[in-house]
Amino acid sequence: MTAQYPAAACGVQRHRSILPAPGPRLYRLLILVGQLALSAAGAAGDAGTRLMLNEDYIRNLHSSLDVEDSAAVFARVFQALPARVLVYPTENYYYFRFAANGRVYSGNLRLAPDAAVTRHLHFAYADAADPANAWYAYLGPEDDVWVERSAPLRYTVAHGGTRVTFQLNPLPQTLPPDFRKQPWEAFIGRSMDESGLGFLLMFNLRQNHFFWILDERARADWPMRRLGDHLLLHPASGFVFFDDRVLRRRLLVGVDRAQVLANTWLDGPFDQLPDNFLAQTAFAELAVRAFPALRGRINRRGEYNDMPARIALLNYRIYASAAALLPWAERCLAGARDASTLTACLTRISPSPR
């Protein structure tokens, strides 16, 4: 059935020569201000309720650690991990927080898609209250850190007598069976970001840009609150979706500006691409279609050849007030000629917030 939308008085103007911002560094730091420290052991392991205990937080806060010594910090973090962890974000970042020296630190471990070849992992951390104080190390055998791929999407990392299995997210890279892909769409892959929500990364072949659709089969059954006639707010993340009742899908159209500026778990999926599968897709070719200035500058995963960064797919609005999205969504609806122009209007790239 042909999708029916309100007739348009004029078409949607497309972006022309906008190059996507490099976004966070490839070795991205997590800064999540305002929560108690959560130990790595409490962030993974058995299913069930895990408690963030104030007594543990205070006890760790009074412990001492030379944070300038990245080897010592890595040893402390690594020894606190359970024997097996599941890395949910599809860019392979495993996030952690710890307290020491009267401060809270946030960071991540990352097994890049080429870790089986390089046998190294990325380790980064920062002072949560002062993100300018940040440290990074690229760790391998020379640091007594041994990385080995034990199975597809599974790595064993050993250091100082401790061994940890990292299971990367095995999201199937196929469309849900009930998804109604349109002739003007290309499916890139399925991803999950730090919020716990899953997304389908799509490309609008008519308008030449990417967009994100909520993956209804990946933990998406959490309650939402309706904003007006066409928008849905996911309260836990602050993400706003356009409820497309014609195509039966939910487009990601808004992310909270405060979360983006603070670089939290809720800053949107712009950099959490399906990295373990991306090189086998047409992603790079489509990225050049969307941004011709990228030709010759990126690899198959959208990483820049001349800097440790990747393109950022901010194909949604960065809002200060979710309510402000209501009149904008109505304008998109009123001006849409068809489903592809409506999608283009709703998922235009946002400039990087300042």
Image: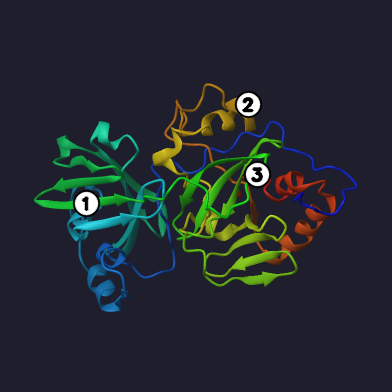
What is the CA distance from the residue labelled 1 to the residue labelled 3? 37 Å
Amino acid marked by disc 3: Ile
Query: What residue is at 45 percent from the left and 26 percent from the top?
Result: 305
Eyeballing the image, is 59 above or below 296? below
Secondary structure at badge 3 equals loop
Residue 99 x, y percent position in the rendering: 28, 64
Q: Can residue 313 be seen in this view?
A: yes
Observer-nearest of 175 and 25: 175
Q: Can residue 26 be seen in this view?
A: no
Relative to 51, is 129 on the left or the right? right
Residue 244 x, y percent position in the rendering: 69, 58
Residue 114 x, y percent position in the rendering: 32, 34
Q: Mark 1 points at which residue?
A: 165
Secondary structure at badge 2 equals helix
Eyeballing the image, is 189 above or below 306? below
Residue 87 x, y percent position in the rendering: 34, 53
Observer-nearest of 227 and 177: 177
Amino acid marked by disc 1: Thr
Q: Name the residue under label 2.
A: 292
The label shown at residue 277 is none
Q: Residue at the far right: name it.
A: 9
Eyeballing the image, is 57 above or below 190? below
Relative to 64, is 236 on the left or the right? right
Q: Residues within 10 Å of mark 2 (few under 14, many from 20)?
A: some
